[in-house]
Image (spheres, coloured by chain):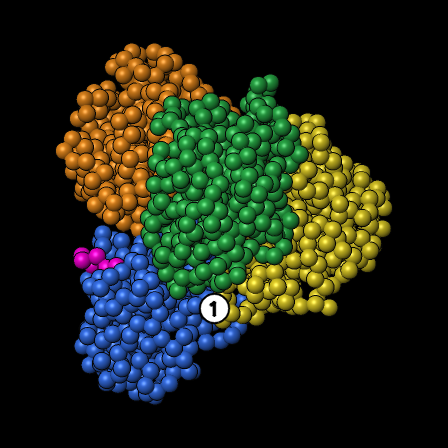
Chain colours: A yellow, B green, C orange, D blue
Amino acid sequence: MKALTWHAPRDVRVGEVDPPHLVDPLDVVIRITTTAICGSDLHIYRGRIPGILPGTVIGHEYVGVVEEVGPGVRRFKKGDRVGGAFRTACGACWYCRRRLYTHCENSMIFGYGLFFGSLQGTQAEYARIPFADTTLFRVPPEVTDEQAVFVGDTLGTAFFAAEIGEVQPGDIVAVVGCGPVGLLTQMVAYTYGAAKVVAVDRIPTRLAFAERIGCIPVNIDREDPLAVVNRLTGGRGADVVIEAVGTEVALTLATRLVRPGGVLAVIGVFAEETFPFPIREAFLKGMTVRHGLANVHAYMEEALAMILHGRLDPSSLITHTLPLEEAPQGYLLFDRGEALKVILKT
Amino acid sequence: MKALTWHAPRDVRVGEVDPPHLVDPLDVVIRITTTAICGSDLHIYRGRIPGILPGTVIGHEYVGVVEEVGPGVRRFKKGDRVGGAFRTACGACWYCRRRLYTHCENSMIFGYGLFFGSLQGTQAEYARIPFADTTLFRVPPEVTDEQAVFVGDTLGTAFFAAEIGEVQPGDIVAVVGCGPVGLLTQMVAYTYGAAKVVAVDRIPTRLAFAERIGCIPVNIDREDPLAVVNRLTGGRGADVVIEAVGTEVALTLATRLVRPGGVLAVIGVFAEETFPFPIREAFLKGMTVRHGLANVHAYMEEALAMILHGRLDPSSLITHTLPLEEAPQGYLLFDRGEALKVILKT
Amino acid sequence: MKALTWHAPRDVRVGEVDPPHLVDPLDVVIRITTTAICGSDLHIYRGRIPGILPGTVIGHEYVGVVEEVGPGVRRFKKGDRVGGAFRTACGACWYCRRRLYTHCENSMIFGYGLFFGSLQGTQAEYARIPFADTTLFRVPPEVTDEQAVFVGDTLGTAFFAAEIGEVQPGDIVAVVGCGPVGLLTQMVAYTYGAAKVVAVDRIPTRLAFAERIGCIPVNIDREDPLAVVNRLTGGRGADVVIEAVGTEVALTLATRLVRPGGVLAVIGVFAEETFPFPIREAFLKGMTVRHGLANVHAYMEEALAMILHGRLDPSSLITHTLPLEEAPQGYLLFDRGEALKVILKT
Amino acid sequence: MKALTWHAPRDVRVGEVDPPHLVDPLDVVIRITTTAICGSDLHIYRGRIPGILPGTVIGHEYVGVVEEVGPGVRRFKKGDRVGGAFRTACGACWYCRRRLYTHCENSMIFGYGLFFGSLQGTQAEYARIPFADTTLFRVPPEVTDEQAVFVGDTLGTAFFAAEIGEVQPGDIVAVVGCGPVGLLTQMVAYTYGAAKVVAVDRIPTRLAFAERIGCIPVNIDREDPLAVVNRLTGGRGADVVIEAVGTEVALTLATRLVRPGGVLAVIGVFAEETFPFPIREAFLKGMTVRHGLANVHAYMEEALAMILHGRLDPSSLITHTLPLEEAPQGYLLFDRGEALKVILKT
């Protein structure tokens, strides 16, 4: 089958690889119809993830059609149109039984090479999906591939962010970062009842997008987000702050924006091991800080329902749609910051 | 001062009564600028509430300006523009300290005559507001009187309904009843994250309003709401059902619509003492049923924030605006079902 | 193998039946070491459950050792010492993925004959356990069979009752009914933080047991439980009331005991279809009523941890331990009210 | 009146000062019968709190009898036996109306000199209590002064710790630190349903106390707490970890003890501004971290109910009871680590 493989930093190629087949009774094999390039694929592309061997098929966002079904699978049959999570969850271990799917003891991540179970990526014509009953969801006919491909990763993460941020109706929410996950989190924060969302970034096109979806855009280079938040809240601070960047500067800002008794959700991925956390300010503020590897499995069907009923549309983030053969071009565009979201059609 | 007084069933008059003055150190007196006729005023109008003596000033929805301030009041000063709850809450008793304001041990209701503390109503030029710090809220300049007048009663009740109904993002919600509270509950359910709201009634104009705010309207005379809900949920039933009518027929329907493990919120006011509750079905479904005298004080500021930031607009329900002098005409229209919401300006 | 079979009202016999074997890839077969007679077995014994054919093996409380393991089972292997829930849960359907195991779309109940999947009962030497990964739990060596046999039914139900009753630290809790489930609920309510539990019944031995575990016993024939509760709460009423009887009299009492804003959990099983629910009082009180078919799967491991660490001991309820051969004698004792809990050893 | 005043590091004296009187309509003045020395008083004693002027009356734990009552006070009258929080809460500001009393915009702390409102301390014969309705609680006759004196500070903090730690029935809880607050937190964790509490410290007498109340004591100098926690949890880590020391070493240990998806409550008071937080580990673990200035007002009545009904007894921590005149001797003993809790009687 055709697939995108990684060979060296900034060297990805489309070529032929062996197609996957059923291995475990709980597997399915799907024929992929739509896949996408995620921000974390960019880390691989740039050579920052150790353990990716040359020739690895990458990618972990996908929609497709079930082709083969293991004998233990209960929820899916051949021909079903499905999407799924960026990582598998067994559904039976201690964590899965408590809906902490992201901590599944048997989890594997798609397209990360030697790590997390060496599962092949989804920027390919076919993919093996272990633990299909818990990893996949059924796509209703009214939902397009271009919408569903967001559900199991970036949109699921946005729901997770709103959930751990404990967004309540009437809240003033600040989201630091307007990348794809940040923008989706802003959309989702409104569906969780935010009265107003403040969107912080420095890239004008992203801020313009945030403004279009109803946020107050704050360009960190020109304006102090704390002043904006204080104006909105009578000086209290934001009820919820979501850090969606993953840098010390962004997180430091985020801790300053949250009000006493408020919640800070940190979903940005940090390169550093430690962060100089303002422990004294956190004490005086009585701050709750929630960190998170996104537990997307818990929100996929709810996210899908919101798309189905027109409450939000993640596909508005798509800037480029390419055939799988042109995936390397998509990586190039994304790497240069010229694309917000690249979709690949097989 | 001028005020609307009740004299006999369907006999209300506007005339002169003694103006109120400060009684307790925690009182304020406000000059009312906007008041409204509530569905429960109609019960009084029709003579169904015992204990209303002829001459009683009625009404309990209000926006105004603070005129006099008791020495113990901490949050308000002369000249503040305010709205407030339909009943007072002391802020200090066992219930108030747990935010169960509606069960306040010292609560008084405006305009109910001998009951609940004999507090004069607000369809008048002035009103005394006991326990002002907990009963009132400040109205931001961007919010109109016509919006704010809903906050302390019908809109607060709608927030309460969504809250006790435990509406979650992605939920399918059914609201039985499209009166003012039902319609507002539908709006609020969306801000709590409902994916889709099914609105049940039999009055075409009300159903049309529900459809305009994004609901699936179901005319009970023509269609089975259970069939609609089952179609939306793959046969499971609604995640949340809110009963906003107060009749045996409506509540029986509501119990049938809720899915296993779902929540039924009963905010309709029943004339009967008992209801033949389907105890066996509730057991098999593992149903949660929440009953409620609306705890509006807990949601007033959040409701106001939603209006301020354009997330919802209760004033879209207003069909008639009259001067206080013509209040009897407003009652007549409302009584005949020709008005959805009547506003009175002083 | 040897098993207890039902033949007619009050006619149960121990004899030979065909042993079970693996049917589905997710099955295990266990050799039962300890089983018990449950209150619901008594309904079958007395002939009140339609659809139980003569010759049906009954019983649904069990501890045993895994003998055979289906190829899809991930958590258990031959030789594991296990207990389990009174009904199976598939772990993959819509409800199971939301931890509403009791509403599992594929659930089967042990020992109920034609109903719920015709699964053979556990008052036998062997049993087939479908969906073993979600239905079973591992028994630590420090926990006895006599303790573990309660976990998957009566004790799990007690945890469920405390959970849906929303028992909070400092609460005054009233439990109406001191049968096995009622008494266990009282124990569990203390572990959930109840400050004091009021135990209502009319059988002196049961009330004496309740008193020994720290409750205030109230003999309904001699004392008004409302007076006791009011004395404890300054007239407010109980924060949480748990109905564990299943009669109109008991539930009516329960509704009267709960304070404004409080919670009533109804776990008693009613013979009637409807109950004349005091809808007006519920409205005025702002009552939450939770009904429930016990979702025991969600609490089994927590219940086990409490036993393991000595926080509670359900085996204190055992009044009789008999060999399986003498099971008919156990039924007789239980039917006559001479036994509180009968354990059967194979 | 007689009172303990601070003069210089390790120089406190008992002498005559002016008695307090009513200032605000919401004040009461109480005659103190029992007061105590808190760990934070030791910081003042040692001269580490800036802004304490010589001659300041210190202390903030107290039980007494109401002597004078302001005209706006609704819950208390002369002669009432009361205890109260270590800081006042107005009950009316934005935070108080959301039960975030500790962030009260008008809060004053007793006995901290120039800070937080310059309110006189309670190691004296009389004290003025502002905002009495929200700051005080009534002491039932069955509860001793020696029990009630813990409620408004150390015991309230322990409840707060268990609450923000989200202790659930069945949890394995680790408490790092066995000072008075740590030990009380261990007691309270059991009332919140902990299956087992691991208590970490290095002082043998404190560890022995922890063992007596049912904890597994771990002497950090001899044993690795992580190994103990892993043994109890099959290698997962503690469900909840509570840091009650306030040092980098203790907090670093605490972050290692918490399981994936678990909660870390940080109640220790840090001298440092920042802490090198393991941001990457927190991300991978999906950790929730809650910081907190104790919101004791929200738990005082629940704590009192637990004492009243014999569920816990904080007075077991008392090692010394002295007359107020000998308070300097009490400080000396506490400073040297020879006392766990010193009570002062007036």
User: At label 1, which amino acid type do we have?
Assistant: Leu
Q: Mark 1 lies on which chain?
A: A
Q: Is residue B325 above or below residue B72?
A: above
* x then y, percent, for residue B187: 59, 39
Is residue C216 shown left or right of residue D121?
left
Q: Quadrant of the N terminus of chain D?
A: bottom left
Q: Residue at x 58, y 34 (%)?
A: B340
Q: What stretch is highlighted in magenta?
A: D138-143
Taking depth in this image into account, of D247 and A256 the one nearest to the observer is A256
* x then y, percent, for residue B226: 55, 23
Q: Mark 1 points at which residue?
A: A284
Is residue C31 shown left or right of residue B150?
left
Q: Residue at x 71, y 44 (%)?
A: A314
Taking depth in this image into account, of D159 and B108 the one nearest to the observer is B108
Is residue C103 shown left or right of residue C252?
right
* x then y, percent, for residue D120: 33, 77
Is residue D72 shown left or right of residue A269?
left
Q: Residue at x 16, y 38 (%)?
A: C208
Residue D5, quarter of the rendered image:
bottom left
* x then y, percent, for residue C286: 39, 39
Q: In which quarter of the image is the C terminus of chain D?
A: bottom left
The answer to whether residue B315 of the structure is visible from this angle is: yes
Taking depth in this image into account, of A44 and B104 the one nearest to the observer is B104
